[in-house]
Amino acid sequence: MSTIIVLDGHTLNPGDLSWDPWRKYGDIVVHERTLPEDIVQRCATAEIVITNKVPLSAETLARLPLLKYIGVTATGYNIIDIDAAKRQGIVVSNVPSYGTASVAQMTFALLLELTMHVQRHSDAVMEGRWSRSPDFCFWDFPLVELAGKTIGIIGMGNIGSRVADIATAFDMSVLGNSRNQTDQSHRRNFSWVSIPQLLERSDVVSIHCPLFPETRGLINKKTISLMKPGAFLLNTSRGPIVAEEDLAEALNNDRIAGAGMDVLGTEPPVNGSPLLGAKNCIITPHISWATREARSRLMTASLDNLAAYKSGHPVNLCTS
């Protein structure tokens, strides 16, 4: 039987799912978390390694000669040195689209909080301010209606397309930018545009592109300067796409109206982040993918990837 090592099982399954079906394919050892210095020792005898966020560098892979398969229980696989894996003949698979609905839902959760400030107003009510109010209602922040506004979506893959669907239901116009311009003729009020055009014309900018060298730092001082003063920025993709110091400066100087971030450049932000103290910035701890429904799909798809590898016909290959 193959040895299967799960490096950070708590991330995918904090206890509400089951690893039992995996035992069909080998002797599975689930580590809740793994520190970088423990990776080689834990994986020394493994043919199969499953990881969500524990990185496997070229140096680490070189010390694991028995390793044949890496299953990434996520869509992004930048934690793996793919070139090194290729050289060693290691198959790497990911799960492309398990979290589409949940991430799109989170995108609008952030946007609705930025536009209606539900939690802040609820907190004010619980503190007794409504009870003491001389008027029948009050609001502390500008309330913004989405109907008639324009959302610019950077990355029109599965998640970006779902965000566009929801935006249309809110009666918003949609601008899209993507490496591959798929047919969007079924959408009303949709246009493909360049990044500068998208930033200039959008009331909301939502990021859904992968982290590549060309997208790292895509949102920076220069590109933020193109945005409308009343615009909102949303990022549920990857933290390094946004230059955090530049965004914090823009928020603190009222250059844009607000930001909703489910991701940061370093996770967790053990050394802090300029955005932690920025004005009108909502930050959540990378949870858009983590509904039980999405994690259940992820668990099933990851197991299917392993089954395909064991059958000699691997799928969802990470090749570049």
Image (cartoon, grey):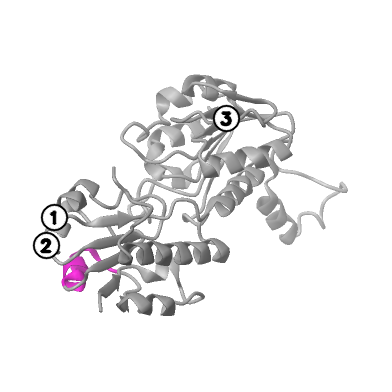
Residue interval drawn in magenta: 34-44
Q: Nearer the viewer, residue 320 or 218?
A: 320
Measured from the top left, where is residue 143 in percent x and y? 72, 38
Measured from the top left, where is residue 121 in percent x and y? 71, 51
Q: Is the residue marked by circle 2 packed among few (<14), some (14-19), or many (20+) residues within 10 Å?
A: some
Measured from the top left, where is residue 205 in percent x and y? 55, 33
Give the residue pinned by disc 2. Answer: 63
- 159 in magenta: no
Based on the displayed image, in which of its 4 quarters is residue 59 positioned?
Answer: bottom left
Give the residue pinned by disc 1. Answer: 59
Q: Secondary structure at mark 2?
A: loop
Do the numbered discs 1 and 2 sit on residues whose CB atoms are within 8 Å?
yes
Tag on residue 294? Answer: none
Tag on residue 183? Answer: 3
Q: Residue at x 81, y 55 (%)?
A: 132
Q: Type of residue at label 3?
A: Asp
| Between discs 3 and 2, the one toward the N terminus | 2
Q: Nearer the viewer, residue 107 or 45?
A: 45
| Between discs 1 and 3, the one toward the N terminus | 1
Q: Quadrant of the N terminus?
A: bottom left
Tell me the mark number nearer the camera, choosing from 3 and 2. Answer: 3
Q: Secondary structure at mark 3?
A: loop
- 37 in magenta: yes
- Label count reads 3
Q: Secondary structure at mark 1?
A: helix
Q: Residue at x 76, y 59 (%)?
A: 128
